[in-house]
Image (tube, grey):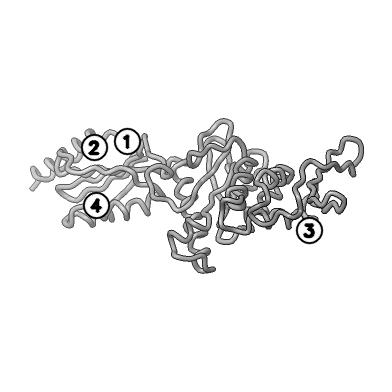
């Protein structure tokens, strides 16, 4: 519903933006929004086929031998310490190899078999990347998620979508499980946080998390159609129009005020809802009233 205000000789319209640009495309965002949905194209562009691929690739790129980190050790330790439900890492003394075992459940719940191994004398970056890849492939998606969240300097928040007569998104979830569910994540990794704040201190991490929350809120405004532009008229001549405002209408009005000429900034105080989007008719009616007032004078 448009809003209108008048302060002679100016008339201001704040109207719906029917063709808004996604804030994931025309904003300088801190976070990366990775979503998966079979009907909606959500979030940022990515090349992951499914959620598991995203989590797997995130961990592999972080812990493979071409990175200056602890290589695959956090992944190997996670499995060695018994945190994985369907995978084990065991040392075979006869072959002097570390073996990756998976539970196939072919016949019993204890049907473990060796799927991969490497020589135990290999250390650090000499451990082959294909073994790290095999270990990640043996983990459940919940376990991959847990490992991603443990990466130092990583801020990652879940994204939930509610789909009923329109769509809306948040990071906390919705009470109706029937029409809602998780569709992805928004994250800022160590490098992204460092580039923005200079370090990965607790203060920097809190700031990054707040920014990601704000980015999701802004994206939700976009999804729910709270997108606006304004047109400013002097008499019956349009002298300014700007589009791309996103948010609650009262907050948008304050943003619009910053773009108005100094002599009519206070016009914002007179804004009220208008039940027609016919701007020309409104201007014509306003001029008729103005003419009648002059005649009475």
- Residue placed farthest to the top in the image? 39
Q: Does label 4 or label 3 sit earlier along the sequence? A: 3
Give me the C-alpha separation between circle 1 and circle 2: 8 Å
Left or right for 291, reference 254 = left
Image vertical order of residue 159 relative to residue 236, above or below: below
Q: Nearer the viewer, residue 261 or 4?
A: 261
Q: Does label 2 or label 3 sit earlier along the sequence? A: 3
Q: Does label 3 or label 1 sit earlier along the sequence? A: 3
Count of number-bearing discs: 4
Image vertical order of residue 121 relative to residue 17, above or below: below
Give me the C-alpha separation between circle 2 and circle 3: 72 Å
Left or right for 284, reference 145 = left
Q: Which mark identifies residue 282? A: 2
Disc 1 and disc 2 in contact, CB within 8 angstroms? yes
For the N terminus, the image quarter is top left
Q: Nearer the viewer, mark 4 or mark 2?
A: 4
* Residue indicated by mark 1: 276
Give me the C-alpha separation between circle 4 and circle 1: 24 Å
């Amino acid at each position: 519903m448009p809003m209108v205000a008048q302060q002679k000789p100016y008339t201001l319209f704040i109207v719906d933006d029917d063709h808004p640009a996604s804030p994931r495309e025309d904003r300088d965002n801190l976070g990366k929004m990775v979503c998966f949905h079979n009907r909606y194209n959500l979030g940022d562009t990515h090349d992951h086929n499914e959620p598991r691929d995203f989590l797997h690739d995130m961990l592999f790129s972080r812990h493979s031998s071409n990175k200056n980190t602890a290589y695959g050790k956090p992944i190997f330790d996670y499995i060695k310490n018994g945190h994985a439900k369907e995978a084990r890492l065991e040392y075979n003394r006869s072959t002097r190899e570390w073996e990756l075992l998976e539970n196939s459940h072919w016949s019993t719940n204890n049907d473990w078999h060796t799927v991969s191994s490497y020589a135990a004398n290999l250390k650090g970056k000499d451990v082959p990347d294909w073994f790290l890849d095999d270990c990640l492939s043996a983990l459940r998606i919940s376990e991959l998620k847990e490992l991603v969240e443990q990466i130092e300097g990583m801020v990652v928040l879940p994204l939930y979508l509610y789909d009923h007569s329109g769509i809306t998104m948040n990071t906390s979830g919705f009470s109706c499980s029937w029409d809602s569910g998780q569709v992805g994540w928004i994250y800022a990794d160590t490098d992204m946080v460092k580039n923005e704040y200079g370090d990965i201190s607790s203060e920097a991490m809190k700031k990054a998390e707040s920014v990601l929350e704000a980015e999701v809120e802004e994206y939700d405004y976009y999804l729910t159609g709270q997108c606006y532009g304004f047109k400013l008229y002097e008499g019956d001549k349009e002298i300014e129009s700007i589009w791309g405002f996103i948010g609650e209408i009262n907050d948008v009005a304050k943003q619009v005020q910053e773009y108005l000429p100094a002599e009519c900034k206070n016009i914002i105080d007179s804004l009220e809802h208008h039940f027609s989007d016919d701007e020309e008719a409104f201007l014509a009616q306003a001029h008729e009233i103005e003419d009648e007032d002059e005649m009475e004078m």
